[in-house]
Image (cartoon, helix red, strand yellow):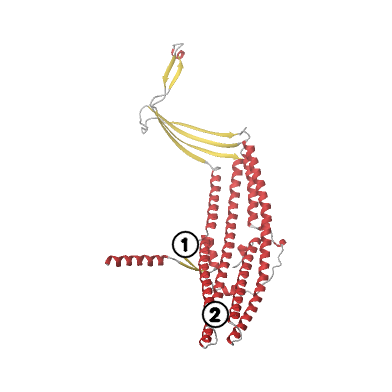
Amino acid sequence: MIKKIFFFQLLLSFLLLNTSAQEKYVMNLKQMLEFAKQNNYEIKKANLEKLKSDQKIKEVRGNGLPQIESTVEYKDYLKLPTMILPGELAGTPGSDLQLSFGTKYNLDAGASLSQLLFSLNYLRGLQVVKKASEIRSLQQEKAKIEMIQLLVNEYYSLMAIYKNLEIIESNLESLGQTRTKTRHLVEGGLALKTNLTRIDLNLANLQTQKDQVLAGIELQENNLKYIIGLDVNSELVVDTTNISQLFSNNELTISKKTNNDVQLENLTEIKLLNENIELNKLQIKQTRAEALPYIAAFASHTYQAQRKEFNFTDSSKDWFGVSVVGFTATIPIFSGLSNKAKVKTEKLKLLNTQDQKEHALSGLKMQFMNALMQYNTSVKNCIVQQQNIDLAKEIKDQEELKYNEGQSTLTDLLIAEQDLRSAEINYVQNFISMKQAEVDLLKSEGILEFHEF
């Protein structure tokens, strides 16, 4: 018994600890955007790529700075080298002399310095990595813009679900009041009991819809948590205090923008492709520079010690120094036409990037047109749905009044309530489609990053 109590205490402690360890975040849209700029996976990935490109600049630049290295070489000849000399040197013509030379123990220690004096390949390579770093900066900007677009659209989808929840709860409350009135009518013999059953059936259906909406809220908040880079074990609660303000926007205006209003060259996608075109051109120049001469200077100083015995620490023994300075010029003559093939490959890459730009310009223009069309269509639908809501509400109020006075049937009242609910939900869907189209429109114009949400 004591063991069981101890086990349950331990289990309870673990659950309490786990619950307290779950961190809770309450955020509005602006706070989520700020959090995502630091924690979104794609943004962090782009930031790391930029850091890597900055280090690559330092790496390539270092190749043109002085290179200093030291070497130590120790040799223990187990058998000394043999040299064959003509016998004439020793007065024995016609024979060979086999002489061993050198000492058993040898130690060389020295340092060398080299400095690149001229290399067009090096200069072009440095330009290439600097251009690559500029491209990484644009990719950072692109990742941030795409994150904003995705996050804001998902946020609006969540607001639509919350608004639908509000509509359903209002319907539940209204239908509950109708049930109370009907119950009194049934008790007074003025209505059939089946009317209560029909109302209960509608209440059950609405409760099912509410449960589905609540599940949708949790799912959507998980999506937002993933987008902003929040730990999966943390709890995200989205602040909905401005939901009424969001949906109370009565200034629904058709956009007068045209295709001529968007400057595609200012879009990050086109800037990226322009930078890639410049990179391709630099890569062509760099590849051509590989076939050009380069010049370097060098200097070295080495100390040598040769001993018949292992006594290198003996200061009375001599060390012999060797110093050298010089220049080296490497002149490529023939590389089997490989350099020519490399240049051709880089030119093909340039053509491919130029084609990508032309294709992107068409695609981005189409995106702008589609977003503009979707926005204006949604605005028109919202205006119609606002009128439908007013009409449906008027009909519902009339049917409710007539039902209370016994001049209308329950069926007419339930249909009127359903029509009102459908009109309200349709308005919410069209309104959110309009807001999401507005986000896409801002992105296609290149001003999404500067928009105040």
**Which quadrant of the figure contains the N terminus?**
bottom left
| Residue carrying label 2 | 175
| Residue carrying label 1 | 232
Q: Nearer the viewer, residue 274 or 434?
A: 434
Identify the residue shown where x is 62% and y is 79%.
Answer: 393
Residue 449 lies in quadrant: bottom right
Indicate whether 45 appears above or below 314.
below
Q: Which of 91 and 260 is in front in this view?
A: 260
Identify the residue shown where x is 58% and y is 81%.
Answer: 410
**Disc 1: CA contacts within 10 A as few (<14), some (14-19) or many (>=20):** few
Q: How far from the left and from the top, in percent, is residue 167?
A: 56, 75
Q: Nearer the viewer, residue 65 or 142?
A: 142
What's the residue type where badge 1 is placed?
Val
Count of residue discs: 2
Residue that sits furthest to the left in the current view: 2
Looking at the rendered structure, the secondary structure element under dot 1 is loop
**Disc 2: CA contacts within 10 A as few (<14), some (14-19) or many (>=20):** many
**Which quadrant of the figure contains the C terminus?**
bottom right
What's the residue type where badge 2 is placed?
Leu
Indicate whether 348 appears above or below 409.
above
Q: How far from the left and from the top, in percent, is residue 154?
A: 56, 65
First in sequence: mark 1 or mark 2?
2
Looking at the rendered structure, the secondary structure element under dot 2 is helix
CA distance for labels 1 and 2: 39 Å
